[in-house]
Amino acid sequence: MATFFTQTSFPSHSLSKTFDTHFATAPKVNSCVSFRARRQVGVRVSSGLIEPDGGRLVELVVKDSERDLKKGEALSLPRIKLSRIDLQWVHVLSEGWATPLKGFMKEAEFLQTLHFNSLRLDDGSLVNMSVPIVLAIDDEQKHRIGDNKRVALFDSKGDPVAILNDIEIYKHPKEERIARTWGTTAPGLPYVEQTITNAGNWLIGGDLEVIEPIKYNDGLDHFRLSPAELRSEFTRRNADAVFAFQLRNPVHNGHALLMTDTRRRLLEMGYKNPVLLLHPLGGYTKADDVPLDWRMKQHEKVLEDGVLDPETTVVSIFPSPMHYAGPTEVQWHAKARINAGANFYIVGRDPAGMSHPVEKRDLYDADHGKKVLSMAPGLERLNILPFRVAAYDKTQGKMAFFDPSRPQDFLFISGTKMRTLARNKESPPDGFMCPGGWKVLVEYYDSLVPSSNGKVPEAVPA
């Protein structure tokens, strides 16, 4: 167990060889899986990891031998100060999560992403890309850059982070970007208010040279495995299938049931060693989400309590910021996991969704995310596994798959209900969450109790 949460040394590149494959009949999970299976002529059973988009993982951190030289160059160039979220996108790009992107998007890439949710490669093939990965600048910064073709990116402490080469500056169509990414321009969208509303009227794209690996020094860096490191770990474990599960909430036993049942189904399909990538989102999240450090404590307890098997589970942090853009964003979440070696992606109800910021309803249809994933351009190689609905079975005293023939026996515990119980230090029904994990959740909400001065500690987005 201890070795599971300890960072090991990995090579900088570890793309696995793709071996000969054979095909198996796709399990009839539901219409979404069947549709994807028809596109793929069955679910692929392979002894190697899925290739990254474009066939090669794009990593943008310079060699150790070039680091001092690039720092010196950065000091001589026009500077752009990165926000916390900008730095998270540099992290995402630098490790190859957005492969084949080589830096912040230029206008052609931005427009393809905005209008087609995909990028056309030089060989004519398509890869999925559904959210713009862009860097905004204002009029003053644009003026300072002038005719320069290179700029340096600096963090909030004044340290050089990267050089952006062969730059292109173009208009930032904020309203169009918001409307096409979120499907609405209603006020109150968290990512929009955080990064777009007050951003500059220009976008700057170019090829990145990242001076050194991005670190946060928050005690969680050992969880932040890059796609290359994850591929190396999957290969070390002799994984012949990798199924990814993204979450931004604490893990309860319903989640665990879905993950263990997925592994069982993959074994029945003929895979010998399917490995779970438990991949919590670690970039920006809205302030009322449970912060990353508390979520990681809770996930660790889930493995310590044996709810998930550490021998067949890899826990790592996905560094992307969260948009809450529903079916558009869930394509990005799935695409990034291809680059990390996952060939199966578990998708649930209303993935990447949120409540409407103005009206009393969900912003997106709860089923559209999984339907869109089954049809999305550039994701044909990925097998989509929609959730089966899990709820608390009162007759068994545990989480189980919902049986519509006896609905009176099931209790649905919403996220709101779970948070209310934890905040009030009340216990959920036995079998809803492992005791160690629940204790962490209670401790988090207890930390928000007003202090002696009457102020509630401010929740800081991850």
Image: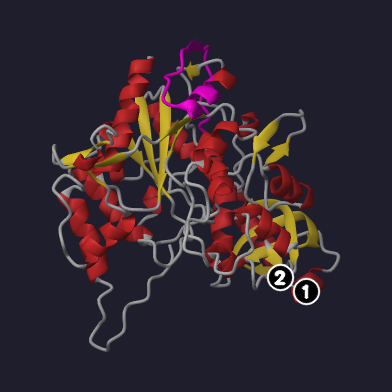
Relative height, residue 84 to residue 166 (above, below): below
Labels 2 and 1: the sequence-earlier one: 1
Q: Nearer the viewer, residue 293 or 358?
A: 358
Quadrant occupied by the N terminus: top left
Q: Nearer the viewer, residue 75 or 23?
A: 23
Residue 181 in picture, x, y percent from top left: 63, 53
C-alpha gap between disc 2 and disc 1: 7 Å
Question: Which residue position is annotated with label 2?
Answer: 200
- Magenta part mainly helix, strand or loop? loop
Q: Secondary structure at mark 1?
A: helix
Where, by quadrant of the figure, is residue 233 drawn?
A: top left
Residue at 55% over, 69% down: 188
Q: Nearer the viewer, residue 283 or 419?
A: 419
What type is the residue that disc 2 sits on?
Gly
Tell me the magenta residue range.
Answer: 13-37
Specify whether residue 60 is in view: yes
Q: Nearer the viewer, residue 8 or 63?
A: 8
**Among all residues in the image, which is located at the extreme right?**
147
- C-beta proximity under 8 Å, tags 2 and 1: yes
Question: Which residue position is annotated with label 1?
Answer: 139
